[in-house]
Image (cartoon, grey):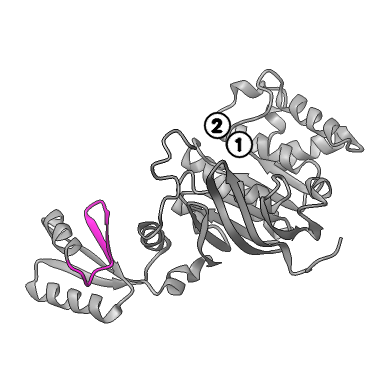
Amino acid sequence: MNGNAEFAISVRGLTKRFGDRTVVDHFDMDVPRGSIYGFLGPNGSGKTTTIRMMCGLLVPDDGEGECLGYDILTQSRRIKEHVGYMTQRFSLYEDLTIRENLDFIARMFRLKDRASRVDAALEDLDLKDRADQLAGTLSGGWKQRMSLAACMLHEPSLLLLDEPTAGVDPKARRDFWDEIRRLSAKGVTVLVSTHYMDEAVQCDFIAYIAYGRRLISGPAREIPKIIGLHTWRVEGGDISALEEELRKDERVGQVARFGPVLHVSGTDKMALDAVAQEQMKRGTHEWTAREAGLEEAFIYLMAGARDNFAGAGAAR
């Protein structure tokens, strides 16, 4: 292998078209080794297609790059040897037990000491007590854990997770992320596509993707600052009427409703602060300045994104 030792993935200009639609449009990205990198965006935004191209699993129509030191255009087979891929839908055999499924995967990878590798995977993911249970009888959380065990059998350097916690309960999601952080601490690079905000904050880095374009990327905690977004939290009575009023105020960039609370945001701090001061003088609601979070940043970015599939009819 060669390439930049600092990055697990480094790509430039990745582009993918299906018919006359460009689903990924000249995408650039550097993914630090050992990081958890989140791809955040609405359904149909090109997250999965982008990740597959970055890792040599899908051939781009344009662009170039390296993954784990291998060329994504000419050395895709070598890349696949070092990648674990967990799909959104459960893709293992429901009429086999957990152990049988893992043994089958180990055979496919032609792993040496197959039985001991399977035993180790069962132990690592706390599946040992359920090893002889049919996969089809597992809950969503246990299927997820089993899928992760299958992905890690061959000890990949890069783990791809496509909407990994869709349809599982909150506890299972927390347990899953504990495992992901443990793997990252061992040096495994993790790429995860998600549209859950509480998962986005688990990532070291985030790329916001909308309709095939990267809107912004960087360390997760710095995304709102990179945008320059400022936020006020507002609570009090008759919040709906105030929400409607603020949406008509040109000095306000966006108004996001969170139950009985409004998050009022914008990139012009002076103008936004003026709105807050005027409202506070009325004394009808409590206004509190707060740091803008990832959710406000996400809403702000999505509001300005253009859907390149608008009017596409049956296009997906």
- Residue in the foreground of this view, choosing between 63 and 222: 63
Q: Is residue 192 left or right of residue 215?
A: right
Q: Which residue is the site of mark 1?
A: 144
Magenta span: 249-264
Tag shown at residue 58? none
Going 81% across and 43% down the picture, which residue do you hit? 154
> Regarding mark 2 in the picture, which secondary structure is present there?
helix
For label 1, count other residues whose C-alpha is less than 10 Å away and answer few (under 14), some (14-19) or many (20+): many
Nearer-the-camera pick, 179 or 74: 74
The residue sitting at the front extreme is 20
- For the residue carrying disc 2, how many other residues have a C-alpha within 10 Å: few (<14), some (14-19), or many (20+)? some
Q: Residue at x 62, y 58 (%)?
A: 36
Q: Is residue 37 above or below residue 172?
A: below
Q: Which residue is mark 2?
A: 140
Find residue 314 and report its horizontal and vertical position in percent.
45, 33
Q: Is residue 258 magenta?
A: yes
Residue at 83 percent of width and 32 percent of height: 108
Q: Secondary structure at mark 1?
A: helix
- State the image coordinates of residue 174 (x, y, percent, origin top left): 53, 47
Q: Are marks 1 and 2 in contact (CB under 8 Å)?
A: yes
| Horizontal side, residue 54 vs residue 68: left or right | left
Amino acid identity at mark 2 = Gly
Residue 303 lies in what quarter of the image? bottom left
